[in-house]
Amino acid sequence: MRMTFAVVAAACFAGLAAVAEEPPPIVNGGDATVHDIAGTSTLVTVVLKDTGAEDKNLRILDVYDNYFVVLSQDKERTAYLFSSIKEIRVQGGKVDTKKFVFEDVRTLRAEEQKVVERAYARAQEIFSATSDNQSLKMHAAALLAINGDQAARDYLEQLAAGNDLKTALDATACLFLLGEVTLNKALLASGLESGNRKARAKAAILSGLLGDHSNEGYLMTMLQDRVAELAKPAAWALSRLGNRDCIPTLLGMIVELSEEKGEGAIFALSRLDGPDVAEQMKLKYDTAVGEMRFRIAQVLYNIEDPMGRDVLANEFMTVPTLAERAALILAREGHPEAMQFLRSRLDRRFDEIEERLVFRAEAAAALIEGGDPVPIAVLQELLRFDRAPVTVRVCELIAELGKRQLLPITQPAIENSTHEIALAACTAAIAIANPNDFREKLIQSRM
């Protein structure tokens, strides 16, 4: 029996909850119980006893004597009686240890709302003051349009329909963040055929985001380009389009010397997934060395093959040149040794060079995602560095984390006189306030 949260309160407390019952069995979860899964990010499918109907993509919030409460992807709370459930299936066969934070379903507190309102106001200031940097002006317009500013949306739509190819593509990318963008196949085709590499890369990315299959042949050719600036976005786009014909080329890319091509192959192979990808990764792993071996391990980890986690934890965590990167991956799932490794790195003295500052930001973010809130202070400290590459990266990480407790630390950066930094901070704050719309599309659009 599936019930809304209000109904279960009436039913269970009217007498059904008098005697504790045995919870339904867990399938594909190893030895985990429903109590182990409750409160984590584990996605489950609930199978009803009488009809065999399946309710998918649920997170278990709480477990009581004879029922449990779940949260759907639509942020709706529902309760199920134990007696009505045949089984609970763990999706992907993996029980997450990371705790699920039930913050996305509550409204902003007054102090949080003030930060978001200031972010919109600052975006308006930058939009009005920026005339010599159209890219920043479009960025500001996108933030304003999220808040219902029709003039800002009209501005972007006008640019998207204009004759300047690069500007039209950039404006279309901004409109994607707002949702309901009209697919302009002619624009994407012009971009892919352009002699401008940046335009071609942007058109490829948009083809993937907007689901435009009409130029897959061109993207396949672009994937084989020796220039990583073109091959990487082509890999990214083709995998988003579900094109499995590109897998042989991706298998070659993942062992190339180019770091950028390697990153593109990791993303694409991970997204395409499947037994064939897992098999090819394992075959290549035996003959690969160093960086290429690490890339293959990342793919295996991303597709949830047990070998990926095993080699990252037991092999690469012991390799000095790769230990930090392995720890960044594992700490996000709450891996104890990886988290302790990153904590020790954050405690060390460090040179204030961009590379190390960015690592500190990424280490702090990985620990926060893994369930340790203490490194929020590290992100706050890094936002004080008046270096755009560092502070912008910190803001990107804050947006990706999407945690409400991070909103206050964005406020000083929102007031930064450098427009690039201020807009990055505004974006982070607004993304946290709009987790299911803007933030999701923002993450999707980042390559």
Image (cartoon, grey):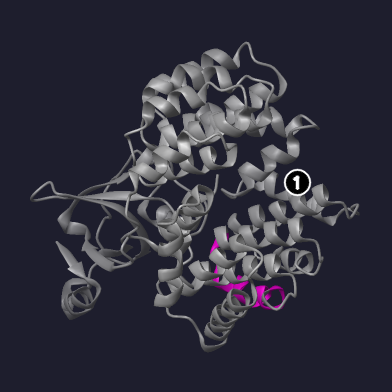
Image vertical order of residue 9 relative to residue 393, above or below: below
Q: In this orientation, which residue lies closer to the viewer: 263 or 42?
A: 263
Residue that extends furthest to the front in the rendered view of this protein: 163
- Is 209 drawn above or below residue 374 in the view shown? above
Secondary structure beneath dot 1 equals: helix
**Residue 398 screen position, x and y as percent:** 61, 63
Rendered residue at 51%/44% (across/down): 202
When asked about the image quadrant of residue 284, the answer is top right
What residue is at 62 percent from the left and 58 percent from the top?
Answer: 396
Dominant SS type (magenta) = helix
Quarter where residue 41 is shown = bottom left
Label 1, on which residue? Answer: 341
Seen from the viewer's position, the closer of residues 74 and 228 is 228
Does residue 304 appear in this view?
A: no
Judge left or right: residue 294 versus residue 173: right
Amino acid type, callout 1: Phe
Q: Most extreme residue toward the top, as rendered?
A: 287
230 or 114: nearer the viewer: 230
The reply to whether residue 373 is visible in this rendering is yes
Horizontal and vertical percent position of residue 67: 26, 64
In this rendered view, identify the residue nearer to me: 312 or 436: 436
Q: Judge the density around disc 1: few (<14), some (14-19), many (≥20) Cα neighbours within 10 Å.
A: some
Residue at the spot x=81%, y=66% of the render?
Answer: 386
Residues shaded magenta: 401-413
- Asked whether, in this view, residue 83 is left or right of residue 99, the answer is left
Tell whether 69 sits left or right of 189: left
Q: Quadrant of residue 260?
A: top right
Q: Is residue 100 magenta?
A: no
The C terminus sits in image quarter: top right
- The spot of residue 208 in percent (x, y) is 41, 41
